[in-house]
Amino acid sequence: MNNRTPIIAGNWKMNKNLDEANALVEEILVYLNEVSKLSSKVVLIPSFPFLSSINTIIEPIHQVFLGAQNCHQADSGAFTGEVCAEMLRSLNVSYVLVGHSERRQYFNETETVLAQKIKQCLKNNLFPIYCIGETLAERESGEFFNVLESQLFNALQGLQAIEVENKLVIAYEPVWAIGTGVTASSSQAQEVHAFIRNWMVNYWSKETAEIIPILYGGSVNAGNSIDLFSKPDIDGGLIGGASLKARDFVDIIKAAQA
Ligand code: PGA
């Protein structure tokens, strides 16, 4: 037993137009009525242009929060095309994905930059969801614990326990499981989540490590979510493909109910 509230976050990536995005939220809310008392937090993470409109729909709904897929590492300034944390806060965003593997891979985000992004989120009262995960080659070589450890250390070093407690969220997303239909087995995922929790015990303290939620992501669906969420260190999920279908997403939310 632990006191962490599960989080189910839907990362829509670069999908949906405005009408489709609004319709998806409305549909999710209809299905959510099937859950009598929501005991998890739900985070919807659409593309930037739709944050404001989706905020209007979900604002009155308890336990449903808005997330963004990225933010820039600077306070403000001459960075054409970028969006900073303060802007997101002003749109009522609560969570921000930092270091998703697609950002690392296609936008060359380094952990030096990711560390700055995490600090920007914390400074602006946003909860960073820091994504880590190994590639298939790193898993097969057996090097993956070292990879994960350096991803944690490089982006989180220097942060005090008090800065991260009740704010930081970690997402373990093995790159080989994202969008591939291949999920980590629940025992593979639990093994890594326990490793991450233990890293936080050593880096901060047992108390701090017990507070910080660790989400699993990578081909989570309604079928495999019950098994994954039954594991003691898996505190919910970061859902890609299945979050674009209201029925599937709400079934995953249901799997996380106490
Ligand atoms: P997936 O994506 O659920 O489609 O595998 C997860 C993610 O990229 O966050």
Image (cartoon, rainbow, N blue to C red):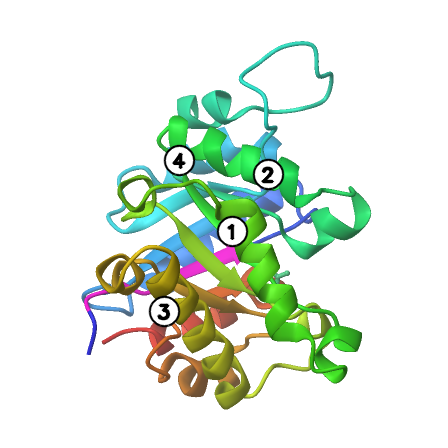
Residue that carries the numbered disc 3 in the rendered image: 235
Q: CA distance from mark 1 to mark 4?
A: 12 Å
Q: CA distance from mark 2 to mark 4?
A: 12 Å
Q: Amino acid at mark 3?
A: Asp
Disc 4 crowd, CA 10 A, few/some/many (<14, 14-19, 20+): many
Q: At 32% across and 39% down in the image, what residue appears? A: 163
In the rendered structure, are the residues bearing label 2 and label 4 in contact, judged by CB atoms less than 8 Å apart?
Answer: no
Residue that carries the numbered disc 2 in the rendered image: 70
Q: At 18% across and 65% down in the image, what residue appears? A: 37
Residue that carries the numbered disc 1 in the rendered image: 130
Locate residue 134: give its quadrant. Answer: bottom right
The magenta stretch spans residue 258: no
Is residue 116 in view from this perspective? yes
Disc 2 crowd, CA 10 A, few/some/many (<14, 14-19, 20+): many
The stretch in magenta equals 3-10
Q: Amino acid at mark 4?
A: Leu
Q: Is residue 65 left or right of residue 102?
A: left
144 up-or-down from 166: above or below: below
For label 4, the SS is loop
Which one is earlier in the sequence, the residue at label 2 or at label 1?
A: 2
Q: Nearer the viewer, residue 197 or 169?
A: 197
129 up-or-down from 241: above or below: above
Which one is earlier in the sequence, the residue at label 2 or at label 4?
A: 2
The location of residue 146, given as percent across then percent down, is 62, 69
